[in-house]
Image (cartoon, coloured by chain):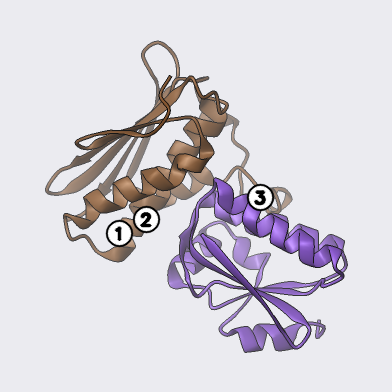
Chain colours: A purple, B brown
Amino acid sequence: MKLNSREQNGVIVLEPKGKIMGGPDATILKEAIRDHVNQNAKNVVIDLKEVDWMNSTGLGIMISCLKTVREAGGEMKLSNVTDKIKSLLTITKLITVFDAYNSTDEAVASIGKQ
Amino acid sequence: MLNKPEIQQNRITIPSDPALIREVDEFVESRLRERHLADTLIADIAICATEIVNNGINHGNKRDLNKTVTLELKLDPEQVVIVVTDQGISFDPQRVEDPVAPRNLLREVGRGIFIVKHLMDTVEIDRAEGGGTVVTLTKKIA
């Protein structure tokens, strides 16, 4: 998995690419979130359009990121969730835990509105 | 001690290093692509293969690099069979908590077998000869 990071309207947008299945993936994403939160950038969108699939380890990484952001008082949203990942979120009922949006623009715009 | 993945035909054996899970995925996907299966089917099988191998590395073998996890792929005309064997502590699926219970939704672990049971047609978990766990998965492809 590769990870690109950018800012959009004051929100950090993380763009992982590939598959999220464990091994080094956990460290890469968790450290990126922790670094941003430590720099007071607490609101994050994870854009999943380039993620082919993830397994339960990947879902666990997403939950860890969500907890880190929430504990810092921020919000984390998902965008461009592929059908494969959406079906995993549905099976595991994590669809009720994550806020998922069809586009990154929508996800960014939703921050601070709940 | 095995230092790197060892591939023999439709079998891959790896030391219990979580970083090697990607090699297992590449092995499984490459074999399935040779059969021209649909992308979504390949993804489901690869997800489940990585789930079971991750379990073997982390929970079975406790990341002991002296122990290995072996995945064997059997490609029948009508189904794919995956057999994963570790050398660790036998796995008792009854001890896994329900991952969709509200109290467990924010847990970071404990969903692997649950997902595999949803995506595969059959899942069998047995004790391996000499200890460890053998997990056999089947998925119909025709």
User: Are the two marked residues, 2 and 3, in contact with CB atoms closer than 8 angstroms?
Assistant: no
Judging by the rendered image, the residue that carries numbered circle 2 is: B44
Query: Sequence-wise, which precedes: disc 2 or disc 3?
Result: 2
Tell me the chain of label 3: B
The reply, left or right, for residue B141 in relation to residue A26 is: left
Q: Which mark is residue B101?
A: 3
Judging by the rendered image, the residue that carries numbered circle 1 is: B41
Q: CA distance from mark 2 to mark 1?
A: 5 Å
Q: CA distance from mark 3 to mark 1?
A: 28 Å
Q: Are marks 2 and 3 on the same chain?
A: yes
Q: Residue A80 or B91: which is nearer the viewer?
A: A80
Vertical comparison of A4 with B63: above or below: below
Q: Is residue B100 visible?
A: no
SS type, badge 3 = loop
> Residue at image x 19%, y 36%?
B9
Question: Which residue type does callout 2 highlight?
Answer: Asp
